[in-house]
Image (cartoon, coloured by chain):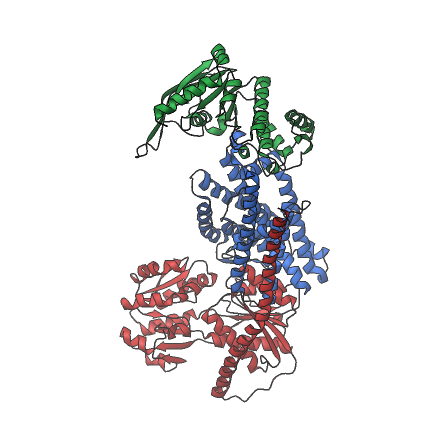
Chain colours: A red, B blue, C green
Amino acid sequence: MKKNELMKRAALFTAMAMLTAGLTACGSGAESTESVSDTADTTVAEAAAEETETSGASEESTVSGDFTIGIGQFAEHGSLDNCREGFLQGLSEEGIVEGENLEVTYNNANADGSIASQINQSYVGSGVDLICAIATPMAQSAYAATKNTDIPVIYTAVTDPVAAELADAEGTPVGNITGTSDKLPVEEQLKMVREILPEAKKLGIMYTTSEVNSESSVAEYKELASDYGFEIVESGISTSADIPLAADTLLNDVDCVTMITDNTVVASLPVILSKAAAKNIPVFGSEIEQVKKGCLAAMGLDYVELGKQTGHMAAKVLKGEAEASDMSFELIAGASFYGNTKVAADLGIELPASLTDSAAEMFDTVEE
Amino acid sequence: MNTIILGIFEEGLIYAIMSLGVYITYKILDFPDLSVDGTYPLGAAVTAALIAAGANPLVAFPMAFIAGVLAGTVTGVIHVKLKVRDLLSGIIVSLGLYSVNLRVAGTANVSIFSKDSIFNNPIVNAVFPEGIKSLATVIILFVIVIVCKVLLDLYLNTRSGYLLRAAGSNDRLVTALAKDKGTVKILGLAIANGFAALAGGIMCQKQGFFDVNMGTGTVVIGLANVIIGTRIFKNVSFVKATTAVIIGSIIYKACVAIAINCGLNPGDLKLITAVLFLGILVISNMKKERHKKNAQA
Amino acid sequence: MLKLENICKYYNPGTINEMCLFEDYNLSVERGEFVSIVGSNGSGKTSMLNIICGSIPIDSGRILIEDKDITKTPEFKRAEYIGRVFQNPALGTCPDMTILENMAIADTKGKSFNLKKGTDKKRIDHYRELLLGLGLGLENKLEVKVGSLSGGQRQAMALLMSTMTPIDFLILDEHTAALDPKTADTIMQLTDKIVKEKKLTALMVTHNLRYAVEYGTRLIMMHEGRNVIDLKGDEKERLKVEDILLKFNEISIECGN
């Protein structure tokens, strides 16, 4: 009886020990994670090298000093990954290169708010020189975690920093925090759609009601649509499971559809594209990745570029050239045109030369 | 390093308040209440809406609690009066609350950084000099948690509290005492969800924003906290169950912090929680069976 | 005092397993009677108790207490004047609470379960006295959780708790069946003492024919939803265990057992 009790206790402690062991194992796992990020890094470095080649810039020398930064990304997402990649490129263009004079810790919160907060606290605790927060909830959480410290936060992919109270109406940061906004170039997009489809009237937008970024984008579309002779048909969903039905309903009612940077909807893009293709309705994208995947065209953001711009801002702060609290948040400088000729041919639409001539990139295949 | 420890306490203490609620439903009432996933952000939504509208942060406390009580009552009524199974009633309510939370807050994400909160206001700033500001949050939270714990302890020792405890451990006794066990269950769920919403409201004030998805997985954290706490202090008689739950909550958050600092992918964290969870449950089941055998012997 | 009038109760109505338990069953119990009920399994004894307490609904008929119709009264409301002790000792007490807390909660029955202190310190001596009357030494274990007591101790607690506040009826549902013979005797004597002291009207279902004969003022034997023996007064006094055993065997032969 007594022995039995002891055994149960022992079992409980074994379980606890297992957890600890698991955690220690993940400690050793950290090295492997690092090596993974190392390889990721080489690709980034290569990409950066390519970039420097094409832009013809001279090779940068690294800045003296050792920097430690923590990157916190809110969720796993193509655009956000591009941001992170671009961010590190941007830093290296400024001579702050991972593995040389920069140590990077990266964590992804997998869309869990409580984890996001702990990631940021852990960065604050380990005394990083700067936190890079990707996406709105991460930026808010990083701001809350660093409030009583002097660690600067640079955010990116925050659509509306003013609404998120990270900056005041003039764009001045509320604290030691600044970054870049991925606000959609709505006006440019509307103009482009009008140019490609002169007859279209009803423009459909699907968005997730729980994504605050999407709400503000839809509001802006509604505000500007009439200037370009469009009527916006919105379709709000709450989970990705709603998308097929919502898409059927929406496609019955519109002449064309435009995507916004809505995480849930973008993740189900192939569903919408195949349904739209069946009805021969063009779908416009909101960024380069979506055009690659089969959207007709986009006046969109290049998140790698956005990340780079953010990286440049971070470099200024790290080098001591500026304080984050003095820098207004930045929007990406200009939107560029992306088109997909394969999709255009399938739809029987010709992309006007006025757009294709100035395209940032054209695709002639659809990425599966 | 200190910041990490403070961070663990901040998070742990806030989740402890929610866990006190889960302790009522899971341990006392033996009711696996999933509505917490909805009531935790409900408290945050109410708080964010009130503070954004210029209300005093202290007013947000009772309002968040009341909102939670109402939601908990709905879960109870669905279960008791409409005879829906316990798990399903919780799922229904947390599902519905998602929309309610969006309505209450107005949008999916509301920031209140610029407004005063109980952690950041002229009085707190005057009392705590700049250097120990981060300590202030933990101290304030500690006071709130102790108040909640003491109030709950006191309540559980009232006549009404006795009835609640009896309802969980032997509901026939409640009937025998000429009381409707359904009403007692509803009362328990109301109080429990009041605590969950209060915790959500406090989290909202601490982090400075409400996000509609912030409730995901709350109930799992709550259950983990309760189970870890009560298992560890099972045979330590001078530690009250409520204290054990609070400590369990801090231990859980400490484990998460260690995991993150070890470089563990937070995505894997849920699996580790699940395994730990299962382990502890299996052990307590083994223990229960042994109890049963003893009773028969 | 208690009247069951034309009770009909079917199990699984409308299905192939339909079973008639009671058809036009009548019973009348006078104030102060201590009725022992015996009968084979499935004869309807426990179902009758459940019908009186309101644990199971009836299909037709009326249940009256002091000429008041309680047929539609929910179980917990009937508990205001009915106390019940179950076969399973765990059902009458709260295992997660201490002896003192259990006594206090039973003492609160009939009062408002409000925010007053659960245990009134002034009543502790009274509880101790009641526990002393059990002769089980529980008066010195007030802070012990009831869950750790033996079945007999718990059943004694349950008996005490169900009769602590004024009730009209005591329902004893095979309340000694789960106990060893010696403890069962103790509990049975205790029951008799309490019933006599408090002048309760009691209904006791038991499989122990000796208890049925020795205790109580009236004896009923049930079979297939009917009373086949119903004796009181002198007839009951003269009754011996052998007599009912004989009747029992008759019935069993009828049934082909």
Q: Which of the image's four quarters has the C terminus of chain B?
A: top right
**Most foreground residue, C243 or A13:** C243
Whether residue A338 is visible: yes
Residue C156 image-quadrant placement: top right
**Position of residue B62 in the picture relative to residue C240 (left or right):** right
Residue A100 percent location from the top left of the image? 60, 82
The location of residue A200, given as percent across then percent down, is 30, 68
In the rendered view, would you say C132 is above or below A179? above
**Front in this rendered view, residue A302 or C17:** C17
Q: Name the outermost residue toward the top.
A: C234
Judge from the rendering whether residue A154 lies leftward or rightward of residue A247; answer left or right: right
Would you place residue B98 above or below residue A36 in this image? Answer: above
Question: Is B247 situated left or right of C30 in this image?
Answer: right
Q: Nearer the viewer, residue B184 or C78?
A: C78
Q: Is residue A135 above or below residue C193?
A: below
Can residue A172 be seen by looking at this rendering?
Answer: no
Quarter of the image where one finds residue B83: top left
Q: Position of residue A9 (x, y in %)?
A: 62, 52
Which sits in the foreground, B109 or C1? C1
Q: Is residue A199 above or below residue B225?
A: below
Which quadrant does the N terminus of chain B fall into? bottom right
